[in-house]
Image (spheres, rainbow, N blue to C red):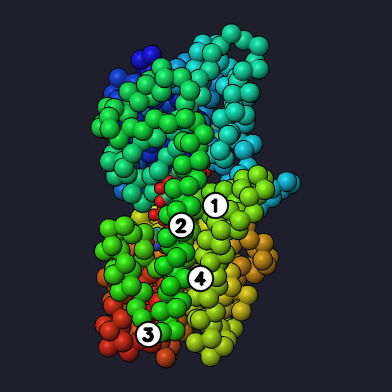
Amino acid sequence: MKVTKICCIGAGYVGGPTMAVIAKKNPDVKVTIVDINQARIDAWNDFDVSKLPIYEPGLAEIVQETRGRNLFFSTEIDKAIDESEMIFISVNTPTKTYGKGKGMSADLKYVELCARNIAKVAKTDKIVVEKSTLPVRTAQAIKSILSNTGSNVKFDILSNPEFLAEGTAIADLLNPDRVLIGGESEEAIESLASIYRSWVPQELILRTNVWSSELSKLTANAFLAQRISSINAISELCEKTEANVNEVAKAIGMDSRIGSKFLKSSVGFGGSCFQKDILNLVYIARSYNLQAVADYWEQVIILNDHQKRRFADHLISTLYNTVSGKKIGLLGWAFKKDTNDTRESAAIYVADYLLNEQANIAVFDPKVSNEKMLSDLNYLNTRSEEENSKLIHAAETPYEALKDAHAVAIMTEWDEFKTYDWRKIYTNMKRPAFIFDGRNLLDKSEMEKIGFEYFSIGQ
Ligand SMILES: NC(=O)c1ccc[n+]([C@@H]2O[C@H](COP(=O)([O-])OP(=O)(O)OC[C@H]3O[C@@H](n4cnc5c(N)ncnc54)[C@H](O)[C@@H]3O)[C@@H](O)[C@H]2O)c1
Ligand SMILES: O=c1ccn([C@@H]2O[C@H](COP(=O)(O)OP(=O)(O)O[C@H]3O[C@H](CO)[C@@H](O)[C@H](O)[C@H]3O)[C@@H](O)[C@H]2O)c(=O)[nH]1
């Protein structure tokens, strides 16, 4: 079937960029992104594209080109479902915060609501595409909801997980390593494949069964996160043995069987996906009574929590075992550079540990607001909102954040941090002036020449 109208439910980090690229590459297909969040849709429709709700390099240009031509943002969900032949579900699937599976399994209530909405509205046959990351066998639940409507509408369900990384979303979408489509109906699979074929070479479009596709997404994230936890485990050993983690990573990465990517030691991985998806994998393994499998993958998370904790502990012990009343400057709050997303960012947890020790924290991040930082901390529920807002604030400039600070902690690898006037920063800090570089971003010898006491990860 030739698809002419697509609807995507969920105008978030995945739905927005993914559909913008589909619209750009398929000018003859009408793409409508819908969401229940009116403010988010208004921001996507803002005339000034610098105000889009998501910051991704290259995104604003594509939205500018396609919006109003064949890309539309709306809260009229039923209308968009009704008129489309293909519906992507791209809503959030966070870790459950209540009931059975609390803290482990994915909360599928938003996905179920979408399925019920589609079932209610659809009058013509639809291809329903799972774009959200879902536990293996979720398609069965969606199918059950859709096939019990009593109508004669035929629904084909496909799994088409998204592998983009934030900060490089547009580049990843334009040049994907592969596109994965899992499904039963060959016709439905080919309808979706033809959308991607507008720019993705045929040999990179992989067809599998639905369950392999669903499980491949969780597995890909588990493998990627495992590499970071593996190199972070080695970083601690490096610090005890005078080995250098950058040198070790380079040496092993040159082995073509290992490969050089994703071996950057850090204060710990963050982001909305890795932890959530591994916890989900662990939960699924436990639900099948596969204890050894579950314990194996859980260790990736345990090590990541350890890495964040030991970074904060090292800072506190170096500052003579107390940070109480001391100003600590944090550079970066986003979970990685080139994004305004802060979900599960290591900075949130490190700040929380330091606040427990009564530090005063000033943060500078080029893309994150004071309100966002406070809401991230308040969400942890460690102390009252009043206390948080007294103890931490976002500074307008890095120089303000670091003035009179006892220490700098680098939490995000923003390129601009390297270009700052570190001599000026040093002059305005308390002595001794410490740098704790959670991203191994700065040049150790240069910083030491200026006068800093410089610590990085795994060196
Ligand atoms: N963020 C990433 O980099 C990334 C990458 C690959 C896959 N994923 C997966 O994609 C999915 C979406 O992630 P995201 O980061 O875009 O989430 P997000 O929170 O940025 O966006 C989800 C959107 O869905 C909307 N929504 C929720 N329920 C709805 C409903 N019933 N009807 C209409 N709209 C509804 C929300 O208002 C929100 O705007 C998740 O399953 C995630 O695991 C995310
Ligand atoms: O060598 C590395 C690589 C990454 N990170 C950190 O790991 C986290 C995640 O980074 P990244 O994977 O680049 O960003 P995400 O946007 O979270 O993307 C991941 O999660 C997405 C959501 O499922 C997937 O689609 C992507 O393929 C997968 O890379 C960030 O805190 C990074 O700073 C490191 O510490 N060291």
Q: Are the residues tagged 1 and 4 within 8 Å (C-beta)?
A: no
Q: Which type of secondary structure does the marked residue at label 3 adopt?
A: loop
The CB of the residue at mark 2 lies under 8 Å from ligand 2: yes
Question: Identity of the amino acid at label 1?
Answer: Ile
Q: Which type of secondary structure does the marked residue at label 1 adopt?
A: helix
Question: Identity of the amino acid at label 3?
Answer: Glu
Quote the CA–CA distance across marks 1 and 3. 32 Å
- The residue pinned by badge 1 equals 278
Report the residue at 43% width, 88% height from top.
Answer: 430
Q: Are the residues tagged 2 and 1 within 8 Å (C-beta)?
A: yes
Single out the residue that lies furthest toward the right: 99
Could you say which disc has been placed on residue 225 in the image? 2
First in residue order: circle 4 vs circle 3: 3
Residue 65: x %, y % from top left = 28, 32
Q: Are the residues tagged 1 and 3 within 8 Å (C-beta)?
A: no
Quote the CA–CA distance across marks 3 and 2. 25 Å
Report the residue at 62% width, 10% height from top.
Answer: 151
Question: Identity of the amino acid at label 2?
Answer: Ala
